[in-house]
Amino acid sequence: MIKSMTAFSQGLQTWDTITADVTIRSYNSRYLDVAFHGPESCQVFEEDIKKIIAKTHARGRIEIRLSVQDDAGDLDQFDVDMAKATAYFQALKKIKDDLNLVADISMGDMLTARNVIVPSKKEQDTEKLWQAIKPCLETASIHLDLMRRAEGKNLFSDLTARMDYIEKNLAQIETEAANIPLIYKQRLMDRISYLTADTEELDPVRISQEAAILADKSDVSEEIVRLYSHIKQFRDILDSEDAGGRKLNFLIQEFNREFNTIGSKAGNASLSHQVVDLKSELEKIREQVQNIE
């Protein structure tokens, strides 16, 4: 069954003190294009994350946004820059000595120095991080696939109905096209009768030969046979479990080529109008096919 390339999913997973929250959005793309956005501590997992996505998705622009929260109590720490603290103390002591100040240098005086005491983060355990991120991402990826399949069912119903419409009208074109040789023969005879009204009657065999040549040039039977074959291929791809978006897009081009040829050979206005109508339907199918994986 076909899958759409546009979808959205989320996942949330807690492991020990770590909670991972992931959001995935999927858009149309010619290839599989995975973009990962997450905290610096999780960049090391980027390739593993892309591999998980590639297991269930063959095409599409897939944007992953990951946030991680660790509620461990020992993560917040502070570092002391002793070189700066010493230099600052020596500067305060010099001011005191040079100005003959009697006040002692206090802890409060030291705390006014900038960047002497700075916050730091304890390095997180990557294995522990991955224990939270991996199942969260796998769940979100599966939900994304389910959503793409659900949208694919809607596309399947729409495309099937449109292909049925094309096949029904193609049968009518086939019936009308069978009369093209007679139409050309009659036109040829009418034209000759007009041009040779005052002359001897022409050889009817010769007229039939000329009409046959014109009819052969306007024969669309091969195009119609190929179109029926394309319709079957289109339906087979819709029923296949493989990603068929590219194949369907190629088939649309083949459909269009055959319709253009039939339109150029059409022997009457009715046939031309039917071809225009089918080309319009084909354009709607082409737009839908752009969404298929």
Image (cartoon, helix red, strand yellow):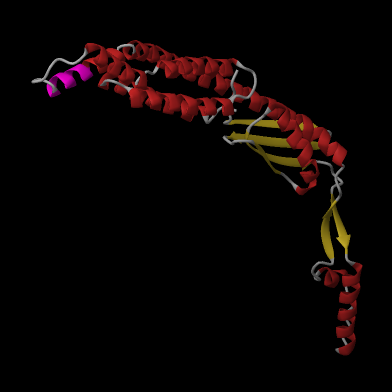
Residue visible at 29% across and 20% down in the picture = 267
Q: Magenta part of the protein: which range?
A: 187-195
Q: Nearer the viewer, residue 213 or 14?
A: 213
Does residue 126 appear anywhere in the picture? yes
The number of callouts visible is 0
The quadrant the C terminus occupies is top right
- Which corner quadrant of the image does residue 261 belong to? top left
Q: Position of residue 15 (x, y in %)?
A: 82, 32
Q: Relative to 130, does residue 268 appear above or below in the rendering?
A: above
Residue 194 included in the magenta stretch of the image: yes
Residue visible at 58% across and 15% down in the picture = 239
Q: Relative to 1, does residue 60 appear above or below in the rendering?
A: below
Q: Position of residue 70 (x, y in %)?
A: 79, 41
- Which corner quadrant of the image does residue 118 belong to? bottom right
**Farthest residue in the left direction?**
198
Q: Position of residue 144 (x, y in %)?
A: 64, 28
Q: Position of residue 256 (x, y in %)?
A: 44, 27
Judged left or right of residue 112, residue 190 is left
Residue visible at 81% across and 71% down in the picture = 113
